[in-house]
Each structure stands twice: as structure tokens, then as C-alpha cells.
Amino acid sequence: MAAPPDARRIIATIRDGGRPTAEELGWFAQGLASGAVSDAQAGAFAMAVLLKGLGEEGRVALTRAMRDSGHRMVWHLPDPVVDKHSTGGIGDCTSLLLAPALASCGAAVPMISGRGLGHTGGTLDKLEAIPGFRTGLSEDQFRRQVGDVGCAIVAASADLAPADRRLYAIRDVTGTVESIDLITASILSKKLAAGLEALVLDVKCGSGAFMAGLEEAEALARALVSTAQGAGCMTSALITDMSQPLATAAGNALEVIEVMETLTGTSVNSALWDLTCDLGGEVLALAGLASDPQDGAGRMAQALESGAAAECFGRMVAAQGGPADFVERWPDRLAAAPVVVEVPSLDDGYVAAIDGRALGEAVVHLGGGRLREGDRINPGVGLSDLAGIGEETGAGVPLAMVHAPSLEAAEAAVRAVQAAYRIAAAVPEEPALVLKRIT
Ligand code: URA
């Protein structure tokens, strides 16, 4: 008779390059959800998977096991149920524009998002920079809001993919994020449990992403698409540039400012706008709400231009406990850091490269992310006015602004940002936003 599952044996099997069975991975996921697996065991499991991998079968089995560690939602709505998920980056606040724009195009968007992970920011932390905004809705509230408003952006409820909730928090603080198996299982367990009909994935590639090279990003995109399709969810992925921050800000309230400027048309960030339209176009086409991705992108642009997306965003904020007048009064509603200083360039020339991970770490150290599980986020801190690749600069010219809780923290961040920028004499080629499409 086979020995009963045992966390120590499962971890040791992976550590030694073996493959645990689907039954063992199912038991481990249930143990993550119930607490039968300890934090130390979860951390060791994550490190063993990161170093040795689970293989394709193991990855699919872990994804399914984590999906089934809790409740699975079923929707009965007239509109197709769609979503997008990003593998994580810097200044990536696309979800905040995309969910209301998709809803304005006739989709139902029950977006289950995450918090900051490693050096990357998290949609929930950004939304919680809006005073009163609640990301922890009950399933009833979530369902009602998606039906009434068309979209809701929430944390996974306690019983939706609870194995991911636990493992995500442990990976965040144990250097175990950058694994194709763990990222696939994490993203898809939540998305598949949410009962989606169509999903678009934004797989980030570059210095600020978990996958820095195109080859690894493509491997992750293919793993995500094939695992999701295999589970019955129409899915495609765009591999998109993360060799520089997407927005010109990185930090929770600072990114919300950029979202509001773009949504209300007061100062449109073109990268944010274009990516929102490209990703939205993909999923509208998958869901049958557009004839093809290009037609879908046009519909998304129309939702943004007409103000319909801004109006829907305002209804979502109000429904989730934020100020009812947020779209009109957002400049008065967001927290600001007490110390704001310039980051002077050390050289003359053009911005040739940016270490996105170092920028993300600078934000985490300012208090915009977590160094330990449960750390409180400071919503006002971060970086703004970040110079992009190709921008001309000169010694003493600001590369960015640091928003800090103290002068001491600001000085450390200034040094970190200066070290993250490479300035060269030659004009560099500007990176394309969408690098590849995987269907
Ligand atoms: N987003 C997730 O939800 N999980 C990951 O592992 C990475 C990005």
C-alpha cells in the first residue's frame, strides 16, 4: 500500500529532481489551504519547485490542485465573463483602466487581483491607495457588483484558491517568485476558479519582469496559455515590454494619479492607453464581442475616449467603498508623501537602459511594498516623472522624483534610482510595447 502523503517527502522528491504525483500535489495544495502544511514547508516547497521544476504534468496538476483548493464560481450573466492578468511589472496599472473599459464594451469583468509580489507592484495595493476602497468583498457583494456595474476588482475571497493566497504571501518574502510552474499555478488557479469564459494574459519581459529574457517569457506565456486552454478557458497572451516602467510612476497612489489622468484625458500616458486597448482587444475578440483583436482595440479606445470607462471606474470605486466623487475630485483624495526630491542624472546623454527590478526594489524600500509578510504599505511613496528609454538628459537634470516618508529614505532612493539608469552618448532604439502574441 502507498505511504500516506507527507509534506517532507513531497518536498524531498522535488528537491532530488523527482516528480510528485498529482495526488500528492493535490494533498499539498489542500494542506496549504487548511494549514496542515506549515509556513516552513510551504517556503521549502516553493524553493524546491523554483530550483528543480515540476515538469509539464506536474505544473498542470499543481494548477488544478490549487484551483480546487477552494470554491469554484459559476456565473449566470447575459454578458461574457472575461478578465486579464499580468505576470507582474513596474508601473503597470493597466488593470485599473482595463476592467472598466471592458465593462463599457459589454463584458462582465470579475477581476481577482493580487498584492505586490517581490519587486513588482500589485493592483490591490494600488486600489487601496483610494481612501475607503475595499478589496475584500463577500462573494455575494462581488456577484452583485459585477452584475450592476459590470466590473469589480477584488482580492480572492478566503475560499477561492486559498492555496494560492497562502503560497503567494510566502513566495513574496522568500525569493521564490521566478518559477514558470509557480507563476502558472498561482495565476491560473485564481482565474480558473473565477469561472471565466475568456482570459488575456500580459506576460512581461525585461529588466522589471520576473522573466527578463524573451525566451523565458515565451516559455511562461506558452505554459499559461496551454494550461488555461486545457482547462476550458479561451486564452491568449501578449508578451509585452518591461525593460522600463510602463507608466511614468511606480508607487501606489502615484500610479492611481497616472490612471486618473489617462482615464479623464487630462494627461494621457500613451503606453498605458495602447496596452489597455491591445489587451482588451484580444479578450473582446476571444469573447465574441469584437470581430478580431484590432476591432476590439478600437472599441476599447472608444470606451476610453468617450468617458464611458471613467464613468464606470467611478461607479466601481463608489460601489467598493471609495469616495462617490472620486473621478471629479481625485487630486484631493490621494495620500501624498511628506518628502519629494529630484533624482539628478549623473551624466549627459540618452537613457540607454533601466534596471526595472532596482526601481521596484527602491519603491519597496520606501514603504510602497513589503519586506516581510503583513508589512503595512505606505500609499503615498514611490517614484514619479521617470525618464524613459531614449530620453535625452544631462548631468543634474532630473531623471525622476522620489516621494519618501523621510529625508534619509529619500536619499537612499535617489542613489538607487541613479544606479538603475544607464546613460549613453548614442541614441538607443526605443523598445516596442508588444513583443509577441501567443494564441
Ligand atoms: N501574479 C500572480 O497572481 N501570481 C504570480 O505568481 C505572478 C503574478
Image (cartoon, rainbow, N blue to C red):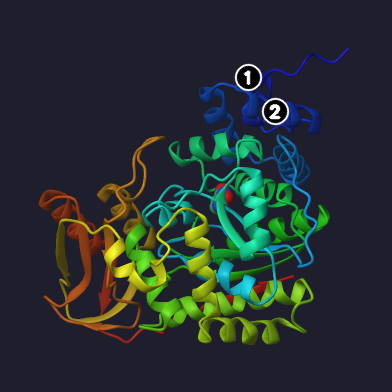
Q: Is residue 241 above or below residue 335?
A: below
Which is more toward the observer, 99 or 177? 99
Instruction: Check mark 2 vs ligand 1: CB closer than 8 Å? yes or no.
Output: no
Where does residue 11 sit, x and y in percent of width and height? 63, 26
Where does residue 368 sit, x and y in percent of width and height? 32, 51
Residue drawn 58% across the image and 86% down it: 302
**Callout 2 secondary element:** helix
Q: Is residue 24 above or below residue 380?
A: above
Where does residue 155 sit, x and y in percent of width and height? 55, 47
Q: CA distance from mark 1 to mark 2?
A: 8 Å
**Callout 1 secondary element:** loop
Q: Amino acid at mark 2?
A: Gln
Q: Is residue 215 visible?
A: no
Circle number at residue 63: none
Q: Quadrant of the N terminus?
A: top right
* Residue 12 placement: quadrant: top right
Q: Is residue 154 left or right of residue 108?
A: left
Residue drawn 35% across the image and 78% down it: 389
Estimate how packed mark 1 is, as few (under 14), some (14 to 19) or many (20 or more) residues with alpha carbons within 10 Å: some
Most extreme residue toward the right, as rendered?
A: 1
Residue drawn 48% across the image and 56% down it: 123
Where does residue 433 sit, x and y in percent of width and height? 51, 78
Q: Amino acid at mark 1?
A: Ala
Estimate how packed mark 2 is, as few (under 14), some (14 to 19) or many (20 or more) residues with alpha carbons within 10 Å: many
Residue, disc 2: 30
Residue drawn 30% across the image and 86% down it: 426
Q: Earlier in the sequence, mark 1 or mark 2?
A: 2
Proximity of marks 1 and 2: CB atoms separated by less than 8 Å: yes
Circle number at residue 36: 1
* Residue 417 placement: quadrant: bottom left
